């Protein structure tokens, strides 16, 4: 028996050493240039010194906990995906917790569950190998309320570190976390000044950073769609930047308000010195023309100080809880293309059931954008709706590089007039089908005037005009 145990222990050591060597190799190859706003156009990202458009579609929020993670990343990479979301959540059945337990199965918040952190390391390592950018969300309000609170390591009944009275926590928080009733999110000095619980929160963030800061392909987001107080976000933004030291990191906060023109979102918009990029995922709760118009408000608002605008969650699928509001699979694909044409630096389909995840519609959408990039780089063009006439609401969207390249997106069928007065000479016109990412007919057109564009399909298409 002892011989078998010794062999098992040796195998474990060898596997751990191999994984660590792979991780070290990834870190060495990852030092060519970190993810940051592109020096030539800070509305977009650059990685390893080159501009990149971030596209994603994955099947889970806390992706590091997914059993088939490596193959899932391969599938994303194979279709041109280079962007994932990863919450540090542990609320789903079977998820590992960040903390170790004692013989009585109680958590000790001073001891780490190394298996949890090994999974996180694997995510960082495998994404670095594939040049896939990781957007981490450190805190998720859904982990600490309702049924999930009952098994939470921070719940006083579940750990050996403090009592209910010592940390001013209750045994139940039955309401939706959007009610913002959980004192867990009030611990900072400017709010409840709950230093005991805050110490454990700080310890968790330090542990996370000790792994993530070794890599250069990581974006940081404080919370998932929070309605929390501004003081909470300000505290963690300062804390994380201080812990990072000389390491350049990109940080934001994701607010919950579906009205992205609200004062809540201006907490990020008005503070570029604190927040290096903007996450506007919640705009995907708005459909059609409103989805586009709200995004234009954001870009106009930050025009004097542009930053990357990310959408790490595009809602919508046949199983979405908001299908009665039009937040369905068609909406998700439309939003994806409106984002890309409108200047978003990243777009990712949300996981099922609220999003498409990695499925046929999202796969073809990513493939279509990568095909478009072979002809037009999106950081070369900008929206020009003024060039379209005869347009109905949500019928078509236009972005151009004046006199050289024109792109017109039709979410469905439609016909509009495109002003080509700034285009001298001839151009090729080619249509791309959205539903299957296939090129359709090609023709030659003459510039200097206007042309009629009529979508050849009713399931979504893009007209690409490039001067010859």
Image: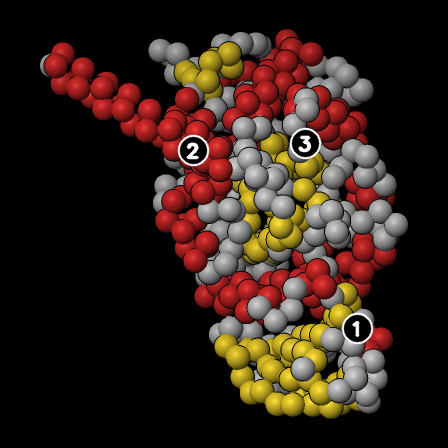
Label 1 close to label 3 by CB (< 8 Å)? no
The span from disc 1 to disc 2 (Cα, nearest Å) is 44 Å
Instruction: Specify which label sits upstream in the sequence, 2 or 3.
Output: 2
Instruction: Specify which label sits upstream in the sequence, 1 or 3.
Output: 3
Q: Answer with left or right where residue 271 lies relative to residue 132.
A: right
* Mark number, residue 80: none
Mark nearest the camera among 2 and 3 is 2
Residue 457, quarter of the rendered image: bottom right
Residue located at (58% from left, 87% from top): 442
Q: Secondary structure at mark 2?
A: helix
Residue 409, quarter of the rendered image: bottom right
The span from disc 1 to disc 3 (Cα, nearest Å) is 35 Å
Residue 258 position, x and y percent, is 74, 51
Q: Secondary structure at mark 3?
A: loop
Q: Secondary structure at mark 1?
A: loop
* Residue 176 seen from this side: no
Residue neighbourhood size for the residue with mark 1, other residues' Cα within 10 Å, grouped as few (<14), some (14–19), many (≥20): some
Can you say whether 120 is above or below 442 in the image? Answer: above
| Front position in the image: 261 or 446 | 446
Residue neighbourhood size for the residue with mark 3, other residues' Cα within 10 Å, grouped as few (<14), some (14–19), many (≥20): few
Residue designated by label 3: 248
* Mark number, residue 25: 2
The span from disc 2 to disc 3 (Cα, nearest Å) is 21 Å
Residue 44 position, x and y percent, is 70, 52
Residue designated by label 1: 402
């Amino acid at each position: 028996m002892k011989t078998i145990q010794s062999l098992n222990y040796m195998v474990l050591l060898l596997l751990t050493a191999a994984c660590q060597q792979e991780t070290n190799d990834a870190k060495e190859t990852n030092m060519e240039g970190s993810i940051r706003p592109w020096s030539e156009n800070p509305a977009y990202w650059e990685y390893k010194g080159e501009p990149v458009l971030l596209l994603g579609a994955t099947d889970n929020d806390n992706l590091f906990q997914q059993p088939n993670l490596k193959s899932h990343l391969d599938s994303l990479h194979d279709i041109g995906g280079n962007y994932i979301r990863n919450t540090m959540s542990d609320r789903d059945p079977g998820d590992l917790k960040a903390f170790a337990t004692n013989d009585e199965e109680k958590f000790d918040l001073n001891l780490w569950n190394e298996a949890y952190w090994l999974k996180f390391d694997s995510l960082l390592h495998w994404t670095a190998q594939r040049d896939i950018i990781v957007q981490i969300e450190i805190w998720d309000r859904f982990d600490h309320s309702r049924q999930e609170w009952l098994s939470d390591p921070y719940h006083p009944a579940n750990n050996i570190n403090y009592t209910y009275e010592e940390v001013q926590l209750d045994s139940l928080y039955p309401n939706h976390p959007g009610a913002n009733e959980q004192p867990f999110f009030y611990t900072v000095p400017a709010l409840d000044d709950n230093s005991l619980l805050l110490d454990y929160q700080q310890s968790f963030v330090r542990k996370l950073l000790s792994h993530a800061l070794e890599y250069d392909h990581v974006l940081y987001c404080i919370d998932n769609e929070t309605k929390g107080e501004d003081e909470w976000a300000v505290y963690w933004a300062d804390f994380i930047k201080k812990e990072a030291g000389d390491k350049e990191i990109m940080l934001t906060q994701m607010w919950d308000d579906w009205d992205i023109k609200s004062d809540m979102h201006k907490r990020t918009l008005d503070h570029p010195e604190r927040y290096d990029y903007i996450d506007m995922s919640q705009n995907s709760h708005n459909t059609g023309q409103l989805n586009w118009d709200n995004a234009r408000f954001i870009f106009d608002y930050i025009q004097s100080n542009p930053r990357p605008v990310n959408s790490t969650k595009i809602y919508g699928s046949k199983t979405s809880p908001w299908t009665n509001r039009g937040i369905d699979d068609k909406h998700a694909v439309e939003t994806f293309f409106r984002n890309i044409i409108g200047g978003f630096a990243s777009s990712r389909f949300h996981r099922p059931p609220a999003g498409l995840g990695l499925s046929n519609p999202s796969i073809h959408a990513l493939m279509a954008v990568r095909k478009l990039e072979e002809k037009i780089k999106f950081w070369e063009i900008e929206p020009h709706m003024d060039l379209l006439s005869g347009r109905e609401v949500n019928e078509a969207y236009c972005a151009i590089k004046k006199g050289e390249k024109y792109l017109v997106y039709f979410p469905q069928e439609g016909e509009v007039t495109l002003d080509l007065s700034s285009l001298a000479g001839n151009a090729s016109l080619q249509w791309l089908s959205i539903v299957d990412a296939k090129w359709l007919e090609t023709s030659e057109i003459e510039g200097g005037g206007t042309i009629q564009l009529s979508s050849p399909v009713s399931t979504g298409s893009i007209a690409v005009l490039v001067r010859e």
